[in-house]
Image: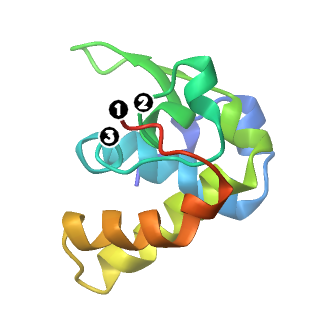
Amino acid sequence: MAAMDSMPAEVKTAPTTVQQAYRFASANPDLLKRIPCYCGCDDIGHTSNYDCYVADGDAGGTVSYDSHALGCSICVDITQDTMRLLKQGKTVAEIKATIDQTYSQYGPSNIP
């Protein structure tokens, strides 16, 4: 998990589950870039669940956060499920399959 002190003020005052999701996303880009989101955020250019939290990052470690997940429970629920499944020892493929099965009812995947 990324440190809370590196998070934007809006994240620091968000509910605990949202804070955890932002911290997890920031610390696990390789994983969340492989996990889709189903909230419809592909309309705003998101191509994975990671994009719901992080807008940009550079090689020096500077991160620009996206505020989208602050107000989207589907994004946060997907990340929380990913965290839980990872702790259970599931592979990325197994996590993605569970996310697809659970959330596809809400709309299309944002992973092209």
SS at mark 2 in the image? loop
The residue that label 3 is drawn on is: 33
Q: What is the spatial separation of the Cα atoms under label 1 and label 2, in whole angstroms? A: 7 Å
In the picture, the disc for residue 35 is none
The answer to which quarter of the image holds residue 29 is: top left
Q: Could you give the CA–CA distance between mark 1 and mark 3, rounded to whole angstroms? A: 12 Å
Q: Quadrant of residue 30?
A: top left
Q: Amino acid at mark 3?
A: Lys
Residue 26 left/right relative to 33: right
Which circle, 2 or 3, is nearer the viewer? Answer: 2
The crowding category of the residue bearing disc 3, from other C-alpha atoms within 10 Å (few below 14, some 14 to 19, many at least 20), is: some
Check whether the beta carbons of the residues at disc 2 and disc 3 lie within 8 A of each other.
no
Number of labelled discs?
3
The residue labelled by disc 1 is 112
Q: Is residue 40 left or right of residue 36?
A: right
Asked whether residue 53 is in view, the answer is: no
Q: Looking at the image, which is closer to me, 23 or 33?
A: 33
Q: Residue at x 80, y 45 (%)?
A: 13
Secondary structure of the residue carrying tag 3 is loop
Tell me if residue 17 comes above or below residue 108 in the rendering. Answer: below
Task: Indicate whether 71 appears above or below 82.
Answer: above
For label 2, count other residues whose C-alpha is less than 10 Å away and answer few (under 14), some (14-19) or many (20+).
Answer: many
Q: Amino acid at mark 2?
A: Thr
Q: Give the x, y percent position of residue 98.
A: 40, 73
Q: Quadrant of the N terminus?
A: bottom left
Residue 15 shows up from this direction: yes
Q: CA distance from mark 2 to mark 3?
A: 8 Å
Tell me the residue that label 2 is attached to.
47
Secondary structure of the residue carrying tag 1 is loop
Q: In which quadrant of the rendered view does residue 66 lie?
A: top right
- On the image, the x and y values in percent for residue 34 come to 28, 46
Callout 1 crowding tier (Cα within 10 Å): few <14, some 14–19, many ≥20: few
